[in-house]
Image (cartoon, helix red, strand yellow):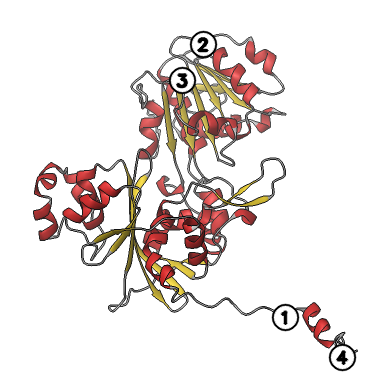
Amino acid sequence: MKIRAELPACLEYPLFSPIADDGFPVRHRALHGGRGSAKSHGFGRGLLVRGFLKPERILCAREIQKSIEGSVKALLDDLIPQMGFGPTNGDGFYHSLQYEIRGRNGTSVDFTGLRTNIDSVKSTEGVTIAYVNEARTVSQNSIKILTPTIRAPGSEIWWDWNPENDTDPVDVMFRGGTPPPGSIVREVNYTENPWFGEPLKSEMEWDKARDPEKYTHVWLGGYKTSSEARVFRNWRVEAFETPADAVFRFGADWGFGSDPSVLVRAFLDGRTLYIDQCVSEAGVETDFVPFLFGGTEGDDLNRRNAQALRALSEAQKARWTGIPQATRWTITADSSRPEMVSYMRRHGFKIISAIKGPGSLEDGIEFLKSFDIVVHPRCEATVGAELLRYSYKTDPLTGEVLPLLEDKDNHTIDALRYALEALRRAGKPAPPPPPKTRDRWDREREAAPSWKTA
């Protein structure tokens, strides 16, 4: 029997590696991302292959399953003949019955709802793979009960979901800090699905062009944001040519731990701020930051950093192309890391520290908001993603938007603040506020007699 698994390359490791990211044997396989990413299809194919290779007892679960039609059974029934397992009527490897699927080698696939059948789940014995589909809706209580229930030696729990909020139990479990031991956690999106096509492609392009917030949430698996809490609104992603005589503004933010090191390049044209270059990467060692910012093609930069250059891998040399002219223009950088400012100054960059003080964050953000911002498509995944998500805090009790900025999704935004700091402190060329729109109430007040003339 010839089996056709046909998995996207990005799913081969998450589905079949016996060793997790932390070096332990795999206990959890977790895939999160947007629509069209083949998460469910990937897990479905993985289950059928695993059940073919050796007998498995598989439990497919959702938080709420009102009927068998509301399970992933229909997906598995479609995949069985597609993958070469033959018909599902008993003549092939898998026999699909009304409520279950059986394999010729003893593999069984059952389906359940966690919330309504939690007692039967607790009494389930011998499950080797539990697949939790649409895990975003799974309650903390269901996770608490399911996890110790799946206890056969070498057993695994698979999770897939389209993220909604960072407070959802499955997100807290796998993305809120350190995931459970033995976890493989991956983000997968339509961009990594080689079979992504119509009609989803047209829907994606429509959302991408007209509703960036929806596009990021639905198609890129970003958390759902509150439009009222968003800081930046007057911005767009658009291709443009950088003028030869552009006056560049460079800003840098330093990485630490999981936070990335960032360099952005921008220029102004009247009321419009154009962002044409950005580099951003976490975990870059200090010796290598000059190459992240300036690339590896500059003779002077390479000479100043000769020892570090010899330590670069070929992959790093190919990846770190830097930002053109980064060593020629002054960079304003985060002043919280003076040792980094000093290091970069000694290694080929004209760099100064930003001036911080009471209100400098809020003033810098308001200054950025006073411009129309255009992001080049090559910076969409970095600058564009943060402009979309950067938000004010909300009151957890009332949902009211507070006048306090969230300290997240702000690395490239901080770099932009620093890039424009000199302009802001000089008091120019901040554009004037837009003219006030006169509404019906304005006109009526103007027409009414004044008490001074009555």
Q: Name the residue tied to disc 3.
A: 51
Question: Which label sits on residue 453?
Answer: 4
Question: Which label sits on residue 174?
Answer: none
Circle 4 or circle 2, nearest the eye? 4
Instruction: Tell me how far mark 3 sits from mark 2, CA to CA.
Output: 18 Å
Residue at 44 percent across and 28 percent down: it is: 178
* The N terminus - image quarter: top left
Confirm whether residue 112 shows in the render.
Answer: no
**324 displayed left or right of 454:** left
Res 270 quadrant in image? bottom left
Mark 4 or mark 2, earlier in chain: 2
Mark 3 or mark 4, earlier in chain: 3
Q: Name the residue tied to disc 2.
A: 151
Instruction: Tell me how far mark 1 sits from mark 4, CA to CA.
Output: 23 Å
What kind of residue is marked 3? Answer: Gly
Confirm whether residue 274 shows in the render.
Answer: yes
Element carrying mark 1: loop
Circle 1 or circle 2, nearest the eye? 1
Q: Name the residue tied to disc 1.
A: 438
Mark 1 or mark 3, earlier in chain: 3
